[in-house]
Amino acid sequence: MDGTALKLTFTTNSVRNTTLAVGEDLIHYEIVTRFWHPTLTKINILNPETLTLKTVAEVQKSYSGKHRVRFLTGKYMGEWIPSDKFLKEEKTKVGGSFIINGIEYRWKTHRRRLQLVRSDDEIKTPLVVYRPYRRASLEVNLELTSFMDRLIVSYLLVERRRRTLRKDVL
């Protein structure tokens, strides 16, 4: 990644309870799963002027193990979408693909690190790179900031799946 990327830094290694922030909280997302709702993860964004949080997406896991997602549309949360409709999983690999504005993006691993690429890019130039060392971070290309909520939800789904598969192997 070059200098035209946002570096979203994680506060913890959890995919259920963490924050993602850029610098001095210019962009600040809170990912939280409350103990009284252990199957519902909310993705909130902080308004830096009013210091209020607004829920922009939710991921719910059913007791059967299936996930479903929904996003803020206008003033209200949209309809629940099965996660396999939002993020098409790859059968033999960890990643998955999703479509935003008619463009398909795909999570893949490169040297055991997640990267997001455009599916139609033959060179496979990474648009998002997960950096696990020191303080874990996502380096996000600036052209993707308009759908950051969907990007974060897709990352959470892929990372949860990656950790589950890794745990099953061990």
Image (cartoon, rainbow, N blue to C red):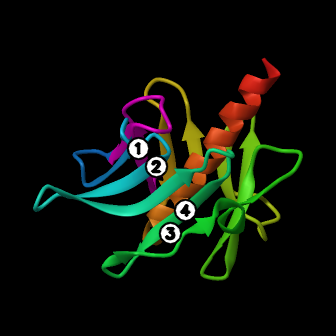
Find residue 143 and name its label. Answer: 3
Mark 4 lies on a secondary structure that is strand
At 69% from the left edge and 59% from the top edge, which residue is drawn? 117
At 75% from the left edge and 40% from the top edge, which residue is drawn? 110
Find residue 37 and name its label. Answer: 1
The amino acid on which the numbered mark 2 sits, given as a three-letter code, is Leu
Q: Earlier in the sequence, mark 1 or mark 3?
A: 1
Q: Position of residue 154 (x, y in %)?
A: 59, 56
Can I make out residue 41 in this image?
yes
Q: Tell me if label 2 and label 4 are in contact, CB under 8 Å.
A: no
Q: Position of residue 11 (x, y in %)?
A: 36, 32
- Please tell me how crowded label 3 is: few (under 14), some (14-19), or many (20+) other residues with Cα within 10 Å: few
- Tell me, yes or no, whether the highlighted magenta stretch contains residue 124: no
Query: Mark 2 highlights which residue?
Result: 40
Mark 3 lies on a secondary structure that is helix
Work out how far the residue at label 1 is from the one at label 4, CA to CA, in angstroms: 15 Å
At 48% from the left edge and 32% from the top edge, which residue is drawn? 14
Mark 2 lies on a secondary structure that is strand
Query: Mark 4 highlights which residue?
Result: 69
Q: Earlier in the sequence, mark 2 or mark 3?
A: 2
User: Relative to residue 10, is residue 59 drawn left or right?
Assistant: right
